[in-house]
Amino acid sequence: MTEKFQVGQIIEGTITGVKQFGAFVALDETTQGLVHISHITHEFLANIADAVKVGDKVKVKILSIDKEKGKISLSIKNALPPPQKPQQSKPKPKPKKEVPIEDFENLMKNFLKDSTDRQTDINKRLNNR
């Protein structure tokens, strides 16, 4: 494995193979790495063939280098800026809390009693003039 690659480095490579679990990327004539399907795009990707195909040129970030096993882990999504989040619209109003019927009946009884008492007071004041 060549010493010219370092973890964190972003380089251009070519897709050389596509499997369900990821894509193989040639970094140079003798060095190849793997981009796991979870590192292809920022969004969920069910089918890797929807995003890349053999022969595509891609920018990749080197995530890890295992010299003993001769494996390089790569990421396409980490080599790109994250997508901008859409502006959030106004928050939706919370649904009004439902009042149990017993509480509603009590509220109405109290309201009617208060209303009747006020009307009685008003009538007394008017008659005392």
Image (cartoon, grey):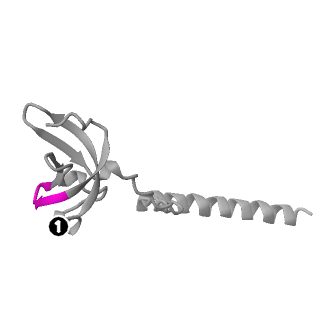
Mark 1, secondary structure of its residue: helix
Question: As drawn, which residue projects farthest toward the front?
Answer: 29
Q: For the view shown, which residue lies furthest in the right direction?
A: 129
Q: Residue at x 85, y 61 (%)?
A: 125
Percent from the top left, x then y, of residue 86? 46, 61
Q: Quadrant of residue 101?
A: bottom left
Tell me where the magenta segment starts and ends, as one range: 15-23
In percent of the image, x 36 and y 52: which residue is there?
Answer: 80
Whether residue 37 is visible = yes
Extreme residue in the left direction: 69
- Using the image, determine if residue 72 lies above or below residue 113: above
Q: Pointer 1: what residue?
A: 49
Q: In the image shown, does 52 or 122 lie closer to the viewer? A: 52
| The N terminus - image quarter | top left
Q: Amino acid at mark 1?
A: Ala
Residue 55 higher or lower than 35, as above or below: below
> Which percent across, then down, holds residue 91?
51, 60
Magenta: main secondary structure equals strand
Residue 126 in the magenta stretch? The answer is no
State left or right for residue 24 relative to residue 104. left
Q: How many marks?
A: 1
Question: As rendered, which of 120 and 81 lies closer to the eye?
Answer: 81
Q: Position of residue 129 (x, y in %)?
A: 92, 63
- Give me the residue at 21% from left, 49% from top: 27
- Residue 12 versus residue 112: which sits nearer the camera? 12
Check the image and report above or below for 105 versus 25: below
- For image coordinates 43% across by 61% down, the residue present is 98
The one nearer the camera, 12 or 101, is: 12
x and y, in percent, of residue 43 in the image: 29, 59
For the question of whether residue 47 can be seen, the reply is no
Question: Is 83 situated left or right of 63 in this image?
Answer: right
Q: Residues within 10 Å of mark 1 (few under 14, many from 20)?
A: some
